[in-house]
Amino acid sequence: MSAATVRGVAILLVVAGIYGAGLLTGRAMVGKTFAEYREDVALDVIVDQAYFIVEQNKLNTQLANLSQLHQEEKARAEAAERKLLADVQSGDRRLSVITNGCKAPAPATTGSLGDAAPRAELDPAHAGRIVTITQDGDEGLRALSWLQDYVCTVCEPEGASWSFCGR
């Protein structure tokens, strides 16, 4: 059963319980015939179900939009990551690190800075592994961001006076 079906059944059970309690105590039927009371309760149930369906549809639309947004962001990020990895592995882009050790002789080019920190260039295969590791971390951060947005969408009512999502 879907969540909407379970919620609908739960609402019906609560209404049936209230309806039954009212019949047993006789308080709900003061001044009304049984048929009038039954019509009022049925109308209340229909109105509640309609409201629930509208709210559920709003939430489903928000979640679908959120999912589409995250899928687009993921596709863009993965394309950029694939290009970066291909460039690093082919040698078109180089990955270097700052070294603490001895200073390398400064190149004799006119564009170099004499006081720049010494750097060591990494082999393309090792640089590719480092890029892959950072891509895995980026993927985890994207997943965390999606989960946070999902929780904020589902758990924080629209127009609430409080917020834990920073909206």
Image (spheres, grey):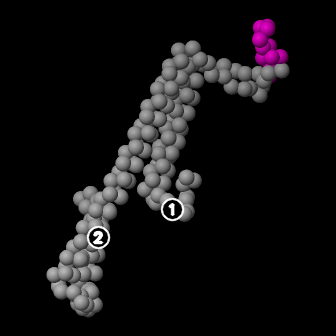
On the image, the x and y values in percent for residue 103 come to 80, 20
Q: Identify residue type, mark 2.
A: Ile
- Mark 2 neighbour class, 10 Å CA radius: few under 14, some 14 to 19, many 20 or more: some
Q: Residues within 10 Å of mark 1 (few under 14, many from 20)?
A: few
Highlighted range, magenta: 102-114
Residue 116 on the magenta span = no
> Which numbered disc covers residue 77?
none
- The residue at 83%/16% (across/down) is 114
Q: Which residue is mark 2?
A: 11
Q: What residue does disc 1 label?
A: 160
* Residue positioned 27% across, 87% down in the render: 28
Residue sticking out furthest to the left: 35
Task: Let me know if residue 10 appears in the view.
Answer: no
At x 21%, y 73%, the residue is: 42
Q: Position of residue 152 (x, y in %)?
A: 48, 54
- Which residue type carries mark 1? Ala
Q: Is residue 127 above or below residue 1?
A: above
Quadrant (top left/top right/bottom left/bottom right) for the N terminus: bottom left
